[in-house]
Amino acid sequence: MKMTRRVKLFEPHPSPFFFDVSYGLGYCTLRKEFKAVRLFSDHDFETGIVKSTNCEVFVLDRLEYWRPTAEQPPLHRVDETKPAVFLNGYLHFLCHDGGIVTLSISNETFGSLLPPSGFDDAASMVTELDGCLCLCYGEPDSEELYHVFVLRDYKEGRWEMLSCIDRTTWPESDRMLLGSLWMAPLGTYHSDGGQKIMFGTGACKVFVVDVDNTAPQMLFTSDDTIIGSCEDDNIPALGLYEESLVAVGRTSEENISSSPIAQAWFNVLKRLPVRSVLELSLVCREWRAMIMTDHFIHSHVVHANLNKSPRIMFIMDPRFGMYMDLENFTDGRGPHLISSLVCSQPVHGLNVGSCSSWDFLCNPAIGYCEHISFDDNDGTFFAGRIGLGYDSEINKHVVVHVTYKEENFETRYYELQCKMRYVNHEQWRPLDPPPRPVAATPPTFVNGKIYWMVEPNLGPVSEICEIVSFDIQTLEFEVLQGPPCSHDSGHMTILQLQDALCVTCSDRKVNTIDVWMMEDCGPWLMKYHIELEKFLPDYLSENTTPLAVDPKNGRILLNAGWSLGYYDPKTAEIETIYTEDIPEHGFRFCPIICQESLVWPYSPT
C-alpha cells in the first residue's frame, strides 16, 4: 500500500508514496523474537537523488502493526528484488550505489559496509555463504565474469574473492542450459578434495562448480519433477530448505483474545461509528493494529449497524468516489443530478453501482471507490448488469456481471453472458448465464443469494412474475416464482427490507406501491400498501422506490428521484427530508444507504 500512489480529488496533502522497498527477516536473541523489516526509499526520477528513506519493523507474535525503527536510516536507494540478508545479528541491505546498509536487530541502529575494491554494481546481490556475508556481481545471462566475494573479517571489513567464474570456458551446451536472468550461490561444500559452490537459477535449476572455475555439473532441474519446466525469472526462484519446528506465532485474533484488556476494547470499539473508530485508531499502535484486523472489520460491520436508522449519503461524483451526508447540505448546495446512475443497497459494508458505461464498487463511509471496467462493454447503460454478494464462509465479497450479447424485443430472442470474481481478486471467472433474461433494475442480495427480476419482454412468455437467484456458494442460478403482480400495471423493483427479499409493484393508475415480502423461503405476503396520490407531484409511483426501513420506528425511506422522505405505514403520511425542483430530461439525484463500515478490499490495481 505504501508503494501505491493514491490520488484523491482536492487532497491538500498527497498520501506518502515510496517507489522502492526491500524486505528482510531477522531474529533477536536477546528478546527471542523475530522481526520483519522493510526499508523504503523515494528518489527523484530525473536526477536519481534519494529524497527520503524510512525503515519499519514488524514483530511476530505481537499485535500486528508496523512501527518505525529506533533510529532513522541513512539516505540510500534500495531494490525490491534484492532482499536483505540476516547474519551475525544484523540485516544487510544492498543499495543502488553498491554500499551495504546494516541494521542491528537488537537495538535497531544503522551502520554501513564498503563493497570489495573494484566492485561493479551491475547485477549485484548479497547472500550468505559458508557462514559469511557474500556479495556477487556480474550479468547472469551473459558471458561476463561472475565474481563471488565473501566477508571473511566482519570487523575489519576484509573481503576475499572466493571465485571468479568465466562462463566462456564452459561447453556451449552448458551455457545454453544454464543461461538465466537470475543466478546466485546457494551454499558451499567440500567434495573430491576441493571446495564447490552450488548455484541456483531463475529457471529453477541447480548446478555446482569448483571455486577454481571448472565446468558446471547439473544437480537438479524442475524438468525432472512433477513441477515441470519453469519459466525463467529475474528474482530469487529457489533456495535451501531448513527443517524447523519454530512457530510463526499467534494470529492477531489469538493475541486479542488472550488479553482481557484488548478484548474489552475490541467489544467497545466495534459498536462505534466509523469516524469515532478512525479517530481512536490514532490513540496508540495497539488499538490501530486491532482495528485493522479482518476480524474487527467484519465484526464492526455487524455490530455498528444494529438497530441504527439508515445513514443517507448522496453520490456527488462516482468517478472520484465523492459522497456527502444528507445533513451536510446547505442552502444553495445540493446533490448532483445524474441521468444514468444506480447504486445497490449495502452488502456487508460495500455498495456496487453502475454509471453510464462503467461500474464501481464503493464504501462511502471511508471514501473508498474502485472502478470496474469490462472488455465486453458496448457503451450502453444497463441497470441490472452488476450484482454484489457476500460469502460469509470465506469472508469475501462477490461481484457478478451479466450483460446481453444480443436482445430482440420483437422476436423475444436474447443471449446473455455472465462472469464473476471475488472483490479482492483480479481474475474473472466465466459462468453459465442465468436461465432467464434479467431486467434493467438493480439486483439485491439476501441470505447468501443475489436476486434479479426477470425481463418479461424477452425469452419464454410467463403469466407470472419471475425472479432469478444466484447462490454465491454453489455458484448456480435458479428461477423462482415472484409475487402475484403484473408488469402491465407499473414499475417493479427487487430489494432487501428487514433482512427479507421484497418486490415492489407500482400501480400507475391509482399511484400506489405494493411491497411484497418473502420471509424464510415462505409464501409471498403483501407487507405494505403505500398510497401516494395525495403526495403528487413529489411522489410518483413510477419513479418512487423504497430504500430501507428504519428499525427504530418502522418508517419506510422512499426515493422519488427528486424527493426523499419517510413514509409511516401507521399514519399513511410522508415526512419529506429533502427535495429538489422537479428536473427535466430524466435527471435524478442518487441517494445511497451507507453502512458504518471499515471494509476496504485493497486491490493491486
Image: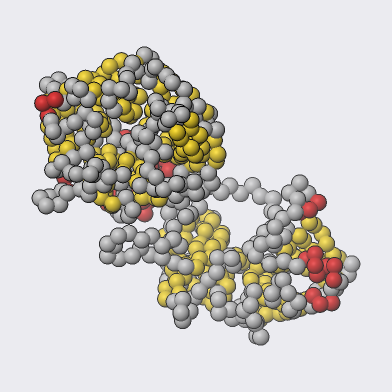
Most extreme residue toward the bottom, as rendered?
Answer: 118
Residue 479 as seen in the image, left or right of residue 153? left
Can residue 437 be seen by looking at this rendering? yes
Q: Position of residue 307 (x, y in %)?
A: 25, 30
In the image, farthest residue toward the top: 523
Drawn side of residue 13 relative to residue 225, left or right: left
- Point 50% across, 49% down: residue: 375
Q: Position of residue 592 (x, y in %)?
A: 27, 40
**Residue at (21%, 28%) from the top-left corner?**
541
Residue that protrudes farthest toward the front in the picture: 410
User: Would residue 407 appear left or right of 565 to someone viewing this image?
Assistant: right
Camera sees residue 276: no
Q: Which colour scheme is used?
A: secondary structure
| Front-most of residues 227 and 257 | 227
Image quarter for residue 202?
bottom right
In the image, is residue 366 above or below residue 388?
A: below
Q: Nearer the viewer, residue 593 or 223?
A: 593
Q: Residue at 22% across / 49% down in the picture?
A: 336
The answer to whether 248 is drawn above or below residue 22 in the figure is: above
Identify which residue, 391 or 495, lies in the foreground.
495
Q: Quadrant of residue 297?
A: top left
All told, the count of numbered labels is 0
Q: Which residue is drawn at 30% across and 22% down?
A: 488
Q: Nearer the viewer, residue 305 or 416?
A: 416
Q: Position of 248 compared to 479: left or right?
A: right
Q: Name the image quarter holding the N terminus.
A: bottom left
Measuring from the top left, give residue 367's x and y in whole percent: 31, 51
Q: Compared to 240, does 339 lie above or below?
A: above
- Is residue 273 placed above or below 230 in the rendered structure? above
Residue 94 percent location from the top left of the image: 58, 72
